[in-house]
Image (cartoon, rainbow, N blue to C red):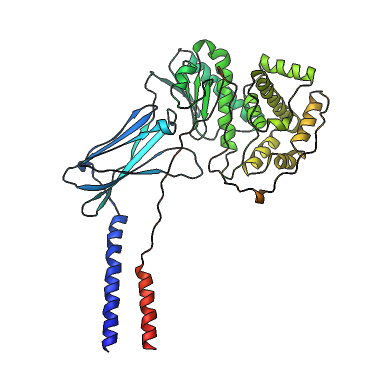
């Protein structure tokens, strides 16, 4: 009887020990929203594009001992992970600075949100109401116009904005009518008065860039002097916008990618009638039979101006051939198969019954150029023999011709923190206790 009473007492003590921290955890798991009356200041000041300074000041009667800042920039992602930063607490004023100069900055127009999680000296947890801020490049006085899903901001030249908006809408119509690919979400265009002004708004951008697209934000920046708006500006707007439209249509979370000749060929096609440079490149390539192997244009284009220009022109001609010979539906099928993670050759085989080399030979026949001797394609490595990591972002865009035309991608990387939830040891102690109890009775 005495042994039974001791056992019951031990079990009760263990349960009290177990439930006490659980009660505290339950309190912390249900934070209270801090009332506006107890918040003196909760803001974020931006020194664009280098840093954001967060500042929170609460009622001094509230003794805060722990603070965590959670923030994120709204963007298209296969995995939405916010950043959490433990912040040192020294009185009622809590401050932390995000040095964007370390990681790159979001583009103007991107939306930032943040909130604080606070713990007082009594163990009670509070959260502040979520705050929002739109990044702006306040060096200039922006004007804004829109049509449909396209919003355009500019500041230099009264006619530049309407002119480039009309070009953007025409490019979207061409993509929809000829290729059946439509803009899925709103897009914002920021037109700078020159490439230098634009590059000053983006950290770590190439010195030669004249435009940059941010597909994860649906934002495009272009540096267009007003005297170039009619010519270079119109074609560049349509080109960069095509990258976003195709990126939306072929978005992938399984590692799917588009070959560069397809990506850039579609963007060149969206520009409309080929420029004199394009027709000159094609005429010269036909005359000299000097086109690059199409398979070599799956990846980065040549760095030299002449070779790069020829690669863009060849890509345009290849897309024009696929559209005229096979129609828009097969191009759509090709994009969707690539988004599903199919290889370039497999996607082409399933869609057109030929791989990259076969496409090149058919295209050469279409433009009346002799067939090229193609060596046997090496057997690809087995996927199981090469460790891989599935990327979380959609297919990356690639640079367009450099200044005054250019495009690159500089997303601001997010560095999320994560934690592991530990399990208490008390349940294991209880199991041990019951095992000992059973042994003792036996």
Q: Residue at x 52, y 10 (%)?
A: 227
Q: Is residue 19 visible?
A: yes
Is 339 displayed left or right of 111 in the figure? right
Residue 182 visible at all: no
Above or below, 210 relative to 179: above
**In what quadrant of the picture does the C terminus appear?**
bottom left
Image position, residue 422 (x, y; %): 38, 60
Q: Position of residue 423 (x, y in %)?
A: 38, 63
Task: From the viewer's perspective, tell me whether residue 116 is left or right of residue 403.
Answer: left
Q: Residue at x 43, y 41 (%)?
A: 415
Quadrant assignment, res 375: top right
**Residue 46, horizontal then vertical, whole percent:** 34, 29
Q: Residue at x 60, y 47 (%)?
A: 388
Q: Quadrant of the N terminus?
A: bottom left
Viewer-proximal residue among 198 and 153: 198
Residue sticking out furthest to the left: 61
Across and down, in percent, residue 386 comes to: 64, 48
Would you identify the image quadrant in which residue 317 lies?
A: top right
In the image, taking residue 313 as reference, residue 439 lies left or right, namely: left
């Amino acid at each position: 009887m005495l042994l039974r009473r001791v056992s019951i007492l031990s079990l009760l003590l263990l349960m009290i020990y177990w439930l006490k921290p659980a009660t505290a955890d339950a309190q912390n798991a249900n934070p209270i929203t801090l009332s506006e009356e107890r918040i003196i200041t909760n803001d974020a000041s931006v020194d664009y594009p280098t840093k954001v300074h967060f500042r929170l000041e609460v009622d001094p009667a509230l003794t805060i001992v722990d603070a965590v800042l959670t923030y994120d920039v709204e963007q298209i992602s296969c995995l939405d992970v916010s950043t959490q930063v433990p912040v040192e607490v020294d009185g009622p004023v809590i401050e932390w600075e995000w040095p964007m100069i370390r990681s790159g900055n979001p583009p103007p127009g991107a939306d930032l949100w943040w909130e604080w999680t606070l713990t007082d000296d009594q163990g009670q947890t509070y959260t502040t109401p979520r705050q929002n801020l739109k990044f702006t490049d306040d060096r200039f006085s922006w004007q804004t116009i829109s049509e449909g899903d396209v919003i355009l901001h500019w500041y230099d030249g009264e006619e530049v904005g309407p002119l480039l908006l009309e070009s953007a809408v025409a490019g979207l119509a061409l993509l929809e009518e000829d290729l059946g690919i439509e803009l899925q979400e709103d897009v914002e265009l920021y037109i700078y008065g020159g490439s230098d002004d634009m590059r000053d708004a983006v950290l770590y951008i190439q010195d030669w860039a004249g435009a940059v697209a941010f597909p994860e934000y649906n934002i495009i920046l272009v540096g267009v002097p007003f005297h170039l708006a009619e010519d270079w500006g119109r074609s560049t707007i349509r080109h960069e916008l095509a990258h976003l439209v195709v990126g939306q249509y072929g978005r992938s979370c399984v590692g799917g990618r588009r070959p560069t000749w397809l990506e850039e060929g579609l963007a060149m096609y969206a520009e409309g009638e080929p420029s004199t440079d394009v027709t000159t490149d094609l005429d010269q390539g036909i005359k000299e039979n000097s086109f690059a192997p199409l398979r070599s244009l799956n990846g980065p284009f040549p760095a030299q101006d002449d070779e790069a220009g020829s690669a863009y022109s060849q890509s345009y001609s290849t897309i024009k051939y696929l559209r005229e010979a096979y129609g828009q539906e097969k191009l759509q099928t090709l994009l969707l198969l690539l988004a599903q993670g199919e290889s370039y050759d497999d996607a082409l085989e399933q869609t057109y019954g030929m791989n990259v080399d076969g496409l090149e030979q058919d295209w050469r026949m279409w433009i009346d150029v002799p067939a090229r001797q193609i060596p046997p394609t090496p057997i690809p490595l087995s996927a199981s023999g090469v460790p891989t990591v599935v990327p979380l972002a959609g297919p990356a865009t690639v640079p367009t011709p450099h200044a005054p035309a250019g495009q690159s991608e500089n997303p601001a990387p997010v560095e999320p923190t994560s934690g592991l939830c530990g399990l208490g040891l008390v349940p294991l102690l209880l199991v041990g206790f019951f095992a000992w109890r059973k042994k003792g009775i036996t």
